[in-house]
Each structure stands twice: as structure tokens, then as C-alpha cells.
Amino acid sequence: MKASTSGSSASETTTTTSNDDAAIAITDALGRRVELRQPATRIAALSPGFTEALFAVGCGDQVVLRDKWSDFPAGGQRLPTVDGAVISVTAVASFRPDLVLLYFKDDRNTHAFAQLGIPVAVFDPKSYAAVAEMIASIAVLCGRADAGRQLAAHMRQVAEGVTARVAAQPQPAPSVYVEVDASDIARPWTIGREALVTELLEMAGGRNALAHVRAPYAQVSAEEVLRADPAFVLLLSPGSRDRSERMRELSQRPGYADLRAIAQGRLIAEVDPDLVVRTGPRLAEGLQALHDALFPTPLETDRPGDAPLLEGP
Amino acid sequence: MKRPARWFWLLAGAVLLCAYAATALGQHAGQVVWEWDWPRKLFTPDGDPALARIIGLLRLPRVLGAILIGAALAPAGLVLQSVSRNPLADPFLLGISGGAALGVVVANALGASGGGMGLWFIPAVAFLGAQGATILVLSIARGPGQRVSLLGLVLGGVVINAFCSAIIVLLLTQFEPLKLRITTAWLAGGLGYLTWSQLAVGAVGVLVALVVLGFRSREINAFALGEEGARLVGVNASRVLYEVTWAASVLAGLAVSLGGLIGYIGLIVPHLVLMMSRRNFLPNLWLSALLGALVLLVADTLARTLLSPQEIPVGVLTALVGTPALLVLLRREMRR
Amino acid sequence: MKRLEVCGLHCGYGDKPLLRDVSFSLAPGEALSIVGANGTGKSTLLATLSGALHPLSGEIWLGGERLERVPARVRAQRMTLLLQQQPLDPGIRVRELVALGRTPWWRGLRGMSPADWEQVDAAIEMCDLVALADRPVGAISGGERQRARLAMVVAQNTGLILLDEPTNHLDVAHRFMLHRVVENLRTARQTTVISVLHALEDARRYAPRMLYLHGGTATCYEQSDYERLREHIVAAADVPPEWVY
């Protein structure tokens, strides 16, 4: 197999299936052209999103190495692991991969892998659409282009369905405070408008209560949260997924009992953070879960303390 | 120009004024708002109970916390600089920062949440880590004669800090990226949530340590003659070093447990005090407490408002401002 | 009036004594010079007398008190040592430095009393430091710094003063001043003075009595015995007689 990377200036991922001297070629997130003679059968998936995508399109058997935070699906648990944040080229290369999937670019790593003749593809999707395209590209690289296209199409369909339902709704989008970590309850960590979760929220019919924060992850003062008085609180922090337990925890924080979201029981704790944070195929599930949590259908309104969303944001 | 009493009242007044102003600064939707009538809003909550709670439970404790931590770090630095005659001595030199940080990182690594301790967990772990480091440093510092010496203290501090740093880095490599980021932010120093009871406990601890140092001010002054010189004017140098180390450790340990690793206050503020006053430990002790409180209060207020709504770790600010300040001070020293 | 009695002192580090059986006695106001070749234990003896080192055996009595048993503060009221070199905080002013000599006399937190300041000013005047009193010690010359440290010793007003090679690094004028101050203290305050000196001429000038350290022992010589001492030194150092004067 031959790896060639030529710098091209395209910033969107495009998929082509045939070329003169390379059987498979795609352009990755950095505009680099990744060409393989044949589908990769020894893939190093160095991010949870990649692992999930590969298994979802049926290439689970072609993965030989995963990063240690990839814990889904269960079938991947038997795979050897390596650190995905601080990448040891030697460790990865010792598994003799024929394709390495990275989620961030590091010139040294890329150069090292190139020297070793190991093809590298870098994907860093920042939007829902980009994730779908990434899955399609990865599928091409592992020889399941059709499955990849189908999965990407499915993701788009889910998104279209959700956005259509949202458009059909008369109410304005409710504000949502997303909490990522509250070890310091006076200065919790949240997500800003550059985060993927913000886009998901907007697609699901809500909006980020702290959209004036730009960075994907940021620490804010609790004062900001209290002043913003969001309509919903979405908990993506580690811990119990039991709503009443988290409700108790939050109402004990100083000032949080004043939040209308707490008073009216609009706390979303049951959404698995991995569904909305990982850039993989499960984003579709996550999007659906968000929408269902924000706009519970009549069948689901027997949760105690819920009020149907009739008021404004 | 060199009358400590005048500076004392000036600084005390400045601290009160800044505390009032800092409590008046609120944050809303990324904008900074001034609420000058906050006492009224706080004590007559009928109008806006939510705001009263914000002021009373979040803002005011944070302002007071900054004052307390600054008033702990600066005197700790002053006393260590005085007994070691080393203008670069810093309270964290004694291994305190390493021990406290290690305690917190280990607790985070174990995923421990302290069970019933709740909000007291992280401060307790940090404080215990700091004291543990001090115990180790003192045992290293006890030379062959079982007497504590300055050189031993410095060596012990360097060793313990290096050791703790190594373990911390090892543990951090095991953290997932987001948790790593959050832990790094804590290590960079910042005033988080402080309950009134934590403030009270901290205040008592700081006050006791300061009073103990005050009673030892005569002996500390004698250290201007060196360890042997101090002994020749009747000071039990070894015992005084031991007591001073504990007092500085309690002060710095309390500061780290409440506010994370905030550097430069213990290093720079003593220098500023010496520029304002003569070398006499007792008045300088209180001056440095006040000046440290003022500096940290200003720094923390900037940390939460400069890039609002984002919070900058206050240790970053003190480092950014403190480094050029230190250069200026060192230049003056070298020119003399 | 406090008489100094040293009885059977064994000095050294660890187990092995460097000096054995040192005994001498001094009345108030008397002076003693300790002389000997390098390495014979002059500094060790001084360190033992000053309390930095524990004696391996033997006793030191000052005015009926056993000096080794006395707490540090009381000991500093009875005796002090002018070190050869001393690290100093360079920012401290001369007057403040001299005032530190009063430290053993403070009670509680009271600090300096007017009586203390009188002692300080008297010491400053005695050592010719009036013009430099307000200068930081980092900004004066080495000789002036030594004067300041001497003034601190004077201000400490102890009955016994030890001097460790005080004339090193001093020019003739400063040596004369030092001699003058020491004589002043001996006559006016009846201070007992013990000096370690390595130049014999200084020893003769400073003190009519000399303690000669040699081969682990200490022998006392009076001024009248000077010729005998000189013979011994010539023999021990193996130098021409003209070199020892």
C-alpha cells in the first residue's frame, strides 16, 4: 500500500472512489489527500468517534488498535489500547497499522508516520454535517463506501426530521444551560457557541443560554448562570444519570433554587454525554434525545414536576 | 515617606474601598455591571431575592476570600524572606505547593468526592497535602545535629516540590482531556466557591498564624545577622526556624486550599512593603497582610471581569503581572 | 563582678577532641589572646566558648554560673562573639544593626526602650559611626561594616567578649580604633576580652596574657614570659627567629 499526501487547499471533505494509480482516495479534514491501494484492514482508531464510526459501518474487524477512551461498542473492548491524546508513534507503529486515524494534527506525528510509510488521515469535524461526511470518508477508506453513505444519509435524515418538527413548533427556542463540570460550583465549566453541542441544541430546537461565550469549553462564574436564568439545565457532567438525585444536588447549590429550570423540574440529566459530545454516528441518537428532552411528547409527560412548555424562553 | 503607621491606615482604607467596589461588580450576559447599592440589595431582599443570594453567597465570599488569601500569602513570604535573607524566597518554596497540588490531583485521579465531606473535601485534601509536605521538608532539614537549618529547609523544599511535580505529571497523563483541562485550571489558581464557614475557619487559622509570627518578631528581626549571629544575640535559631516554618506552612496551606496555586503574591508583596518601610518585622507583618489582600483582590476582580464571561485563573494574572514587576525589582536590587 | 573560669575543657567535633585539658582563669577587665598555628584549634576553642559547640568535657564558669547550662537569651547577656565574617541583610541600616545587639535584653514584646537606645548611640559614638548611622550596611565599606558589627557587640554590653581574628582585613587606622575600643571597654566596663589572633605582634599589643595552642594542648604565657613563648613558636614553626616578633 502506498501512502501519498499532497497538500491541497480544499477544506471540505470530499469523497472519490477511484483514481489512476490509487484504488481509494479521500481528502481529509486538513485538505490532505489520503490514498490507499486497497481498503485498510489494520486501522488504528485514535479517538472514540472513529472507533464508533468504524464499527457502525461494519469495519469493526478491521480495527487493530483503539485509544483508551473508546469504550463503545462493546465489541471493541477486546482491542488493545493506546493513549490518544499524547500519541506515541512507536507504540502505534508497533501494531503495524495500514491506516492511522487522528483527530488533531501534529506535524511531528504526521511526519513520523509518513517516514514509516503509514498513511494518516486527520478528521476534526466541527459540525454535525462534517461528522456525517467524516463517517462516509472513513467508510471509503475501510472499503465499506456504501454502508458509509447509508449511515451518513441516515444521520442527515434524523437531523432533517428533527429540524422539521422544530420548525412546526410555534414557540421560540428555550434557553439551555449546559453544564460540563461543576467541581467548583461557583465557577462551573460550560460549553460556548463554538462547541458542537451548541449546534445540536439549536437543531433540537433550543439555544445555548450562555451563547456569548465563544470557546468550546470555558469556565464561567455561577453568577452568569444565575442571571441567565435558563429554561432548561442540561447536565453533561459525570455522575448519576438519575434526575431526582441530580435535582436534589443542584437545588442545594447557593442560588440555584431560584432558577426557574430547577423550580419547574426542567433538568435534563438522563442524556448520556457521550451521545452529544463524541463526534461519531451516535450524534443522531444524541440529537433525537435532546429534542425529546426539550419537547417531551404528550406520552412522556408523566414525569413528576414537569410543566408542558407553554411559556416563552 | 517611611512611616509605617500612615501606610497602615492608607492600606486598610484602600482594602475596604476596593472590597466595596469589587462586590459591586456583577457579571451579566458577558457584560460587567456596577451595582453600587449592593448592601441595600443584600439586606432588603424583598426586591430581588435571587440577586441578594448571588451577592451574599457568591460575590461577597469571593471578595472576602481574596482578601483572606492575600493576607495569608504575603506575610508567609515576608517571614521566609526575613529569616533566609533571600529576596527570592516564596512560601511555596517549602514544598507546600507541591504537597497541596498533589493531594488534589490524587483525589481527582481516584475520582474521590469525599463522601459526606462535600464542599470541604478539596480544601481539606489540599491543606493536608501541604502540611504533609512540610513534615517531610522539616525531617529532611533536620541535619545531623537534629537542628533545623536554613540550607536544610531550602534543600528539603526543592526536593519535595520536584518529587510532587513528577507524580502530578504522571497522574495527569492518565486523565482524559477534559478532566485534564479542568485540573490544570485549578492548578493555575483561582477562587472558587467558598462558604461562609470555610471563610471563618480560614480566617481563624490565618489570624492565629499571624499572631504567632507577631510574638516571634523580635527573634525574626535578629535573623538579619544570619543564623549564627542570631544565636549570639540570644535567639534559639533552630527553634525559631521550626516555628516560622510551621506558621508559614499553615498560612500558605490555607491559602492554597481555598484558592489554588496563586503565585507571586508571596514573592513580590514583601518587596513592595520593604520599599515603603524599614526593616522591622512586626509592622511589616501587618503591612504585608494588607497589601497582599489588596493586590489579590484587584487581581481576582480582574480575573473574573477582564474576559467576561470567561474566567481567567487568577494565578495566570499574578504571573503575567508579577514577572515584569519582579524584573523591575531585581533591577533595582542589582543597581544598589 | 564576674570571673571567668575554664576548667579542663576538651574541645572538638564528634568524639575526638582537638584540644585537651584547656584551663585558664580571667578576672573582670583582663584580656587574653589565643595564638597558635593554623589548625591547632583556635576557632574550635572559640566556638566552644561561645556556645556554638558543646564541650566534650570540662566546664566553663562565668561569675558562678555554668555557661553551658544557661538558656540562650541569658547566655547572650553574659557573653558574645564578634565573628570574623557574618552574612548580613544588606538593607538594614547601621543604627538598626547596632540596635539588634540589645535583643537579649528585651522582655516580651516591648522592644527598644530609651535606655536601650542610649546604649546604641553610645556604641555608635565609641566606634566612630555617627556619620554612617543612617546608611544601609550594604552601602558601606568592609571595614566600616566591621566597625558596625563591633558597635553591635559594644551595645550588647556583655561582661565577656570574644573576638575572632578581628584585625584581619583591617588597615592600620581601623586596627588602632579596634584596640582603642577594646581598651575602653576593659577599663570603663571591666569587660573581659578573649581574642583569637594569628599575628603575634597583635597578640602582644592586645593582651598581656597569651594562650598558646600547640599539639592539642594549651599553655598560658604572661607578657613577661614572652621570650620563652617566642622560642617555642620558632621551634614549632621551624622558621628563622627574625620572623617571630
Image (spheres, coloured by chain):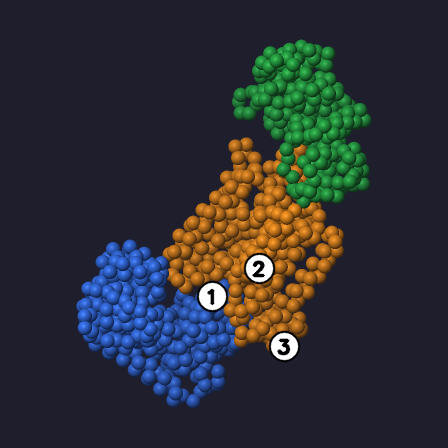
Chain colours: A blue, B orange, C green
Q: Give the x, y percent position of residue C242.
A: 65, 14
Q: Nearer the viewer, residue A290 or A211?
A: A211
Q: Is residue B233 above or below residue B97?
A: above
In space, the residues marked 1 and 3 are separated at their CA atoms by: 29 Å
State the mark number for residue B321.
2
Q: Secondary structure at mark 2?
A: helix
Q: Amino acid at mark 1?
A: Ala
Q: Nearer the viewer, mark 1 or mark 3?
A: 1
Q: Quick one: SS at disc 3?
A: loop
Which quadrant would the C terminus of chain C be assigned to in this image?
A: top right
Numbered label attached to residue B46:
3
Say if labels 1 and 3 share a chain: no
Q: Amino acid at mark 3?
A: Asp
Residues at marks 2 and 1, CA–CA distance in whole angstroms: 29 Å
Q: Are marks 3 and 2 on the same chain?
A: yes
Read off the chain for label 1: A
Dot 1 corresponds to which residue?
A182
Mark 1: which secondary structure?
Answer: loop
Q: Position of residue B97 (x, y in %)?
A: 51, 51
Q: Residues within 10 Å of mark 2 (few under 14, many from 20)?
A: few
Q: Residue at x 37, y 70 (%)?
A: A277
Q: Quadrant of residue C224?
A: top right
Residue in the image at 49% along x and 50% along y = B98
> Residue C142 location in percent, x, y?
67, 36
Q: Is residue C180 above or below residue A116?
A: above
Which image quadrant is residue C220 in?
top right
Residue, x 67% and y 33% (percent of image)? B232
Question: Tags 2 and 1 in contact by the CB under 8 Å rule?
Answer: no
